[in-house]
Amino acid sequence: VLVRTIGSFHVGGRVVELRGLASRTNTLVPGSPPVLVDPNGDFHVGQMYIQFVRLVRPRATLPLVLMHGGHVTGACWETTPDGRPGWQSKFLEAGFDVMVCDTVERGRAGWSRFPEIFKSEPFFRSTREAFVLFRIGAVEDYSTNPALRRAFAGQRFPLAALDNFAMQMVPRWNGNEPLIEAAYDAALQRIGPCLLLAHSQGGGFAFGAALRNPDLVRALIVIEPGGAPHPSAETVESLRRIPMLFVWGDYIDRVPFWAAVKPSVRVTCDALAAAGGNVEWIDLPTRGIRGNSHFIMMDDNSDAIADLVIDWCDRQKLRAPGDAV
Amino acid sequence: VLVRTIGSFHVGGRVVELRGLASRTNTLVPGSPPVLVDPNGDFHVGQMYIQFVRLVRPRATLPLVLMHGGHVTGACWETTPDGRPGWQSKFLEAGFDVMVCDTVERGRAGWSRFPEIFKSEPFFRSTREAFVLFRIGAVEDYSTNPALRRAFAGQRFPLAALDNFAMQMVPRWNGNEPLIEAAYDAALQRIGPCLLLAHSQGGGFAFGAALRNPDLVRALIVIEPGGAPHPSAETVESLRRIPMLFVWGDYIDRVPFWAAVKPSVRVTCDALAAAGGNVEWIDLPTRGIRGNSHFIMMDDNSDAIADLVIDWCDRQKLRAPGDAV
């Protein structure tokens, strides 16, 4: 692809001053003179990180903002765990300017001292928990020995590369949601009109961002969102103006969390449809596409699912006709 | 630039199992059903993250690996705090395939529970501490009010954008050096022969990586390294075969840490030169280039300093003649 710019920025958050904490000695580089470090002072907290790749000749009319889910960073959109090009590449090749987010507390966004600034301890996700919650296989078929793991029959997640996926998991906090929401708002104000493509936990943040910035969010693509707003009359009136695509994978009924979340999101989708909203609900198994895990963008048919999303964008006239870039 | 691939991978580290910790309740998405989280289990620890951009027609014969310094991530090579293209872009335009590292514990590499896995508490760097240690200005000229800050006379760091820089700082640990060294070794084994360009704390890791992987490190560019190996006969014999460029900014004598580090690195450089090593030491002020902070790649003359590095690469025959890419 012919790239005009690659770059990044941090956005959002505020300055917090800490006082009254005791100093500690640190050695900045092995062998270098020790320095006394004062943990007090002014720190920027609550910011997020956005990396952008802009094409010389984009075909999409607006940039596509990729919002990751829980316990991961924007790296989830890059190369798949088994080494294939990820959705960042796929959408660039399809002519979208792509912006990849690391939300507050994750990846290059950085994180803050707790409990002084962030108010609680972080959670770390084990590979076993990911295997189960992301619907790769049943808990009794997990082993810390990769050779002994067994996935659900027909599983498309690259099981042999599960440890590569485990390497990209990062801690998360419970309670930072207001910081994350504020940072996404600041990001949207800076980016301007755009298309949001969000996964899992990012889906809930995308709905919220759309509600608070209805003039800036021109389309919303949610891949297995972790939740959706309760469809009050006000919410429906605001969201029904935004073209929206929902995509769901397989094995939903095998994990109680997803078996509960999916129908609750469906209630919102149906309310939007009933109010004349421009919504499409793609349940991959009912289209005969079986075997997708929660991390659809990493599954062995990730390119084909991206093509479904791109086809929807084309039908929404979010991309101009043309050649590959 | 005409880009062939953008992607990333995680590399290095190992699996650690935690046992005996108490479970906690978490709500994964506001409004979603609470889940009981078992903090025990298997976690991948000690990995690092590398993002690569490969050109269709690279002019450099080997990929350039950018190694960041302390308290920052690979984002330090991207857009400068005041919004200009950073060294990642500059070297891509010059025809280098560029790989940007987030080392263990930083950015998209992720980090591990402490004190169970990482053995100590992290350090957070205040904006004030950065202002002083990175030689932007004197401590008495710092204020938490950006309008009241005053930099050293002639300062090239974009002072008005200091808060944008503060937003990209992340925590670090003391004692993770062996993990970081092992991860860089694993990265080099995967990348193969390459050029290392390292800043600050990353400089020490680059020297170490070169000592342990002398067949893979084909050139070493250190921008204000935080340290260099003691020049024992064995060290000199190994390192003197590697072309090496040192670059230093201004105001070194204003900060005791750097006033101590620079001459200690010079001892190693001189020992390599005395043994016939192919070393070049660029002290920018003695060349009449004044005003550079510790973060030379963010200063207002960052493009010009990158050109000095590229010129050195050309003299070392690390880049083929040709047009811009």
Image (cartoon, coloured by chain):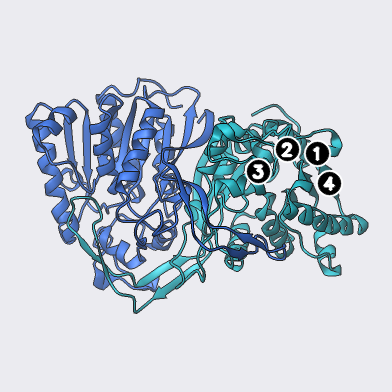
Chain colours: A blue, B cyan
* SS category of the residue bearing label 3: helix
Q: Chain of mark 1?
A: B
Residue wearing tag 4: B281
Indicate the amino acid at tag 2: Asn
Residue wearing tag 3: B140
Instruction: Estimate the spatial distance between the alpha carbons at disc 4 and disc 3, rounded to whole Å.
Output: 32 Å
Marks 4 and 3 in Cβ contact (< 8 Å): no
Q: What numbered label is drawn on residue B284?
A: 1
Along the polypeptide, which appears first: circle 4 or circle 3?
3
* Residue B291 point in image, percent of width and height: 74, 35
Q: Are marks 3 and 2 on the same chain?
A: yes
Residue wearing tag 2: B292
Instruction: Estimate the spatial distance between the alpha carbons at disc 3 and disc 2, rounded to whole Å.
Output: 20 Å
Along the polypeptide, which appears first: circle 2 or circle 1?
1
Q: Are marks 1 and 4 on the same chain?
A: yes
* SS category of the residue bearing label 2: loop
Pick the front one: A298 or A183: A183
* Residue B163 point in image, percent of width and height: 53, 38
Indicate the amino acid at tag 4: Trp
